[in-house]
Structure formats: structure tokens, C-alpha cells
Image: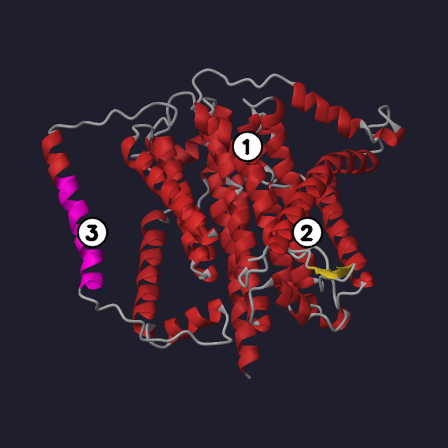
């Protein structure tokens, strides 16, 4: 009974949160609703007994959405509504419906054709995180390592793109030094 | 799932809520007294014996103050932000074993609300959500100081979270479990079995990260009074402002419990002596938070990021590699 109550509660909350994310024109509402929705999803993992995945869902998405807030802070005045430029509502509607139908088909077709089978039986006497580790480092070792290499490439790329003048600190420099450092970067009259 | 279990869980939740809300209030009193003695003052001393009732006076003041919602703020986010800080602090405590199990009238009580087998991940993950309070409060109030504070809290979050995770990895590799009770039982053999002796580097790193996690003084840049007024709290008044403080002080207590359990043996073998030792360790870590505030200046945001990414993270990674090599051979 508790599982059913918890499931319907969190299902409703998740759907409401993601609806707000899509419908609102206020950037702060959108990001906050998305963070809340992501955290509510972790409840499903806890209900299913996958504690490890639930905790990871919380940790990963709080960090990931925090980066979105940083972008929101830089791009918008978050206390105002964002005015969107909609040239053709019909095209937006058609594309949106098509995308939604496609996602449903992708996820439903294996269930309809009964192709989902649990190949790895649940091991008795093994904790949740150990079970995840065993599958991750045996059956899914290659995808796991590939993902790790891709993340490493992304990280190195990020460092190279962002870290052109990492040895210099703008905070510790005098105004003239900053001006002479880069011709394209000119501080405004009167400094800060 | 029987009725006794449900009643027991509800009682535990209520007890933890009451005890730690009261402790959070008392924490402000301890902080003022400790800071005062270190600065050769007397601190609160007029209200009640030794100024103890100052806590009650502050509470009444906060509860009865007008709750002002300024113009131009994003109302619902502004209202919910302090609740996030306070609520997540208490939610995180669900997986912390506060005391060894004991028997009352033939009924064994486990003083932990939910003994999930990924305890430490859950505690740190939910504690991390607590930083959404300052972030949302800062972004929702139409105030430049608050916005700077929100930007800082995002930067602090991204920096310290790496250190917390990486520094914990090495002790967790030794224990082989994420449950705080398993970690405690691993060190049940007495003072020589404490993880701090085999993982001193991880201990120091985690301790430093705990200061960033709770936003205490060397890393108090989210609400640095002399730079950005009160940061995210500038526009808040009354109980909403108080909720931020309850969250902060409750977090200090809970992170002290976590440090004591992971590195300093926790409640040991589960006797009364072990339980009292755990409380003493927690009291020491709480005192250390106050001590640091009296003794150290604040760092700048860029210094914090430099420290986290260029100093602490490489040390944590090297610590993990060395632990792995030692465990392998």
C-alpha cells in the first residue's frame, strides 16, 4: 500500500514539475522545477529498492542543474520573464508532438514485442552497490570505459578552451596590466 | 510493514526534529559565548542565567517579526528557498546512526530512521541539495548582493563537492560498504582501528570540505558580511531568515556526526561508553567550527577555487591511487 501511495504521489509531482519546466516563461521557475523533478525521480529508484541509483540520481542531478543555474545567471535577468520569439506556433506544435510520439514509440516497442528479459538474475546476499558494480565491470565494461574516455576528452577540451591565460589572475592585476594584456579586452572608463 | 514499525519511525523522526531544532538554537548561543571568550568579551549574559534564555528571546523575536516579501522578487521561489535549506538538513539526517542500538523494556531501538545500504552517499547527496537554498534565495531576490552570493554558492558547490567525494573514496575502498553502520562496525575494535590512522590525508581533506559544505568561516564567502552585506539573506526577514540559520546549524551537527563516524570510530562497539564518546567527538568538531571562526579570516572566492581544484583535488586523487596500490599488494 505504501509503495502505491508513494508511487502515485511522486509520479504526480514529477509530471507537474516537468510540465512547469516546459510551460513557464520564467527562467528561475523552469530550472528550479527541473531540479525538483530530477530529485523526485530518485524516489522511484528508492521504491524499487535500487538505493544506489537513487542516491546517485540525487548527487548527479543536483550538480548538473547547478551548472544550468550558472548559465541562467549569465544569460537572463532571472527575476523577469523571458520573452520568447515564436515565429510559427504551428511548426512548434507539430515538431513537439512528433518528438513526443517518437520517444513513446522508442520506449514502448521493446515492451510490446516482449524483448526485455532480465539476463542477469538478482544475486542473493549481495548489496545494492556491489550488484551495480558487478554488472558494470563485466557485461558493460566496454561502454563504461568508452564513456569514461569521452568524459576525459570533454574535460581536456574544456580546460584547453577555457584556460588560455590561466597563469594570470585578473584579481591580482593592476588596471593597466589588464589593458595591455589583450588588445581585444578593454576595461571601461573608470575601471570597475 | 507492521504498525509498530510505523509508530517507531514517526517517533524517531519527531525526536530528531525536536532535538536538533533545539540544538540549532543552542548552537547560536554556544557560538556567541565561544567567540566572546576568545575575543575577551562576555557574550550574552543578561537574559536568564549565563544568558541562556537569550536563545528563547531570539526565537520569539524571529517568530513574531513581520515576514516581508519585497517588491520585484520571484515570490514562490523566494518563499521556498529557506525551507529547502532547513528541510534537506533534516532529511539528510535520516541515514545517520546517532547512537548505538539499545533495549527499552524488551524492545530494541535502532536510533537511525532509515538504515539504507548507501547511507553515506544519501547523506552527502541530500546535504548538497541544501546549497540550493542560498542559490535560489540569492537569485530570486532582486538584489545585486544576493545575486553575487548566489553566483558564489554555485562556484563553492562545484568546487567542494569534488573534494568530498574523492576524499571519501579511499576510506570507502577499505571498508567496502557505503552504510554508516558498516563503517562504524569496521572500527569497532577500539582506538587503534580508527580509519583516521590509516587515512589521515582523507580525514583532513574531508574536514576541510565540511567547512565549505556548511559555509563556515574560512569559506564563509556565500554570506560575507563585510563584502556583500548578508548575501542571500539580505532581503529576508523574520522566520524565513531564521530557517536558513536552523539549516546551517543543523548541518554543522550532522556533518560533525558524519566525520566522527567515518574517521574517528563512531560509537565503537555500541556500549554506553562508546555512545558518550561519540557525543564528545561531535562536540569537539562543533567546537572546532566555532574556534576556526574566531581564529581565521575568510578566503576570497578565487582562492577557494584555487585551493579546491589545484591543491586538494590532486592530493585526493594521489591518496586514492596509493590506497589502491597498498590494498592490491
The structure's colour scheme is secondary structure
Image location (x, y in percent) of residue B98: 69, 55
Q: Determine whether the residue tagged by mark 2 lies in a helix, strand or loop.
A: helix
**Mark 1 or mark 3, whichever is nearer to me:** 3
* 3D distance between C-alphas at marks 1 and 3: 38 Å
**At which x and y percent is residue B254?**
65, 49
Q: Which mark is residue B256?
A: 2
* Residues at circles 1 and 3 in contact by the CB criterion of under 8 Å: no
Identify the secondary structure beneath mark 1: helix
Q: Residues within 10 Å of mark 3 (few under 14, many from 20)?
A: few
Mark 3, residue position: A104
Our reading of the magenta stretch's main secondary structure is helix
Residue at image coords 55%, 35%: B222
Side (left or right) of B272 relative to B298: right
Residue B55 x %, y %: 76, 30
Task: Tell which subunit mark 1 falls on.
Answer: B
Secondary element at image label 3: helix
- Of label 2 and label 1, which has the lower sequence position? 1
Q: Give residue B24's quadrant in the image.
A: top right
Residue B82 tag number: 1
The range drawn in magenta is A95-112
**Does residue A150 appear in this view?**
yes
Q: Is residue B48 left or right of residue B77?
A: right
Please tell me if label 1 and label 3 are on a single chain. no
How far apart in space, not on screen, are marks 2 and 1 (Cα)?
22 Å
Chain name for mark 3: A
Which mark's residue is nearer the viewer, 2 or 1?
1
Q: Position of residue A74 (x, y in %)?
A: 36, 33
Amino acid at each position: 500500500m505504501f509503495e502505491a501511495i508513494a508511487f502515485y504521489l511522486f509520479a504526480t509531482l514529477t509530471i507537474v514539475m516537468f510540465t512547469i519546466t516546459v510551460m513557464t516563461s520564467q527562467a528561475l521557475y523552469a530550472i528550479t522545477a527541473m531540479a525538483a523533478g530530477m530529485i523526485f525521480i530518485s524516489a522511484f529508484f528508492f521504491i524499487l529498492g535500487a538505493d544506489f541509483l537513487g542516491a546517485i540520481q540525487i548527487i548527479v542531478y543536483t550538480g548538473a542543474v547547478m551548472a544550468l543555474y550558472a548559465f541562467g545567471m549569465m544569460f537572463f535577468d532571472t527575476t523577469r520573464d523571458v520573452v520568447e520569439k515564436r515565429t510559427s506556433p504551428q511548426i512548434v506544435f507539430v515538431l513537439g508532438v512528433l518528438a513526443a510520439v517518437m520517444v513513446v514509440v522508442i520506449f514502448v516497442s521493446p515492451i510490446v514485442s516482449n524483448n526485455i528479459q532480465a539476463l542477469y538474475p538478482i544475486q542473493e546476499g549481495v548489496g545494492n552497490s556491489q550488484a551495480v558494480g558487478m554488472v558494470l565491470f563485466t557485461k558493460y565494461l566496454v561502454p563504461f570505459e568508452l564513456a569514461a574516455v569521452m568524459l576525459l576528452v570533454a574535460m581536456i577540451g574544456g580546460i584547453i578552451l577555457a584556460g588560455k591565460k590561466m597563469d594570470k589572475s585578473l584579481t591580482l592585476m593592476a588596471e593597466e596590466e589588464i589593458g595591455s594584456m589583450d588588445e581585444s579586452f578593454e576595461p571601461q572608463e573608470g575601471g570597475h | 510493514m507492521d504498525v509498530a514499525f510505523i509508530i517507531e519511525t514517526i517517533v524517531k523522526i519527531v525526536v530528531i526534529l525536536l532535538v536538533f531544532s533545539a540544538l540549532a538554537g543552542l548552537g547560536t548561543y554556544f557560538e556567541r559565548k565561544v567567540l566572546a571568550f576568545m575575543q575577551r568579551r562576555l557574550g550574552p549574559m543578561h537574559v536568564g542565567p549565563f544568558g541562556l534564555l537569550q536563545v528563547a528571546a531570539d526565537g520569539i523575536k524571529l517568530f513574531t517579526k513581520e515576514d516581508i516579501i519585497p517588491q520585484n522578487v520571484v515570490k514562490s521561489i523566494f518563499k521556498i528557498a529557506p525551507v529547502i535549506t532547513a528541510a534537506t538538513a533534516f532529511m539528510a539526517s535520516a541515514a545517520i546512526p546517532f547512537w548505538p542500538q539499545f533495549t527499552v523494556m524488551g524492545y530494541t531501538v535502532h536510533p537511525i530512521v532509515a538504515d539504507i545500504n548507501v547511507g553515506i552517499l544519501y547523506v552527502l547527496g541530500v546535504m548538497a541539495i541544501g546549497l540550493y537554498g542560498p542559490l535560489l534565495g540569492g537569485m530570486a531576490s532582486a538584489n545585486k548582493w544576493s545575486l553575487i552570493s548566489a553566483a558564489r554558492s554555485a562556484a563553492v558547490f562545484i568546487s567542494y563537492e569534488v573534494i568530498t567525494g574523492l576524499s571519501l573514496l579511499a576510506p570507502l575502498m577499505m571498508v567496502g560498504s557505503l552504510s554508516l553502520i558498516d563503517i562504524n562496525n569496521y572500527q569497532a575494535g577500539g582506538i587503534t582501528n580508527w580509519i583516521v590512522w590509516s587515512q589521515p590525508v582523507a580525514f583532513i581533506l574531508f574536514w576541510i570540505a565540511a567547512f565549505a559544505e556548511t559555509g563556515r568561516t574560512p569559506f564563509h564567502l556565500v554570506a560575507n558580511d563585510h563584502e556583500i552585506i548578508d548575501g542571500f539573506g539580505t532581503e529576508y526577514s523574520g522566520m524565513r531568515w531564521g530557517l536558513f540559520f536552523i539549516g546551517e546549524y543543523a548541518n554543522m551537527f550532522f556533518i560533525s556526526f558524519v566525520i566522527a563516524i567515518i574517521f574517528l570510530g563512531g560509537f565503537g562497539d555500541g556500549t554506553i561508553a562508546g555512545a558518550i564518546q561519540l557525543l564528545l567527538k561531535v562536540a569537539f568538531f562543533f567546537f572546532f567550527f566555532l574556534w576556526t571562526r574566531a581564529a581565521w579570516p575568510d578566503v576570497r572566492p578565487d582562492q577557494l577555487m584555487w585551493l579546491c581544484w589545484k591543491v586538494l583535488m590532486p592530493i585526493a586523487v594521489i591518496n586514492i591511487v596509493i590506497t589502491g596500490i597498498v590494498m592490491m599488494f
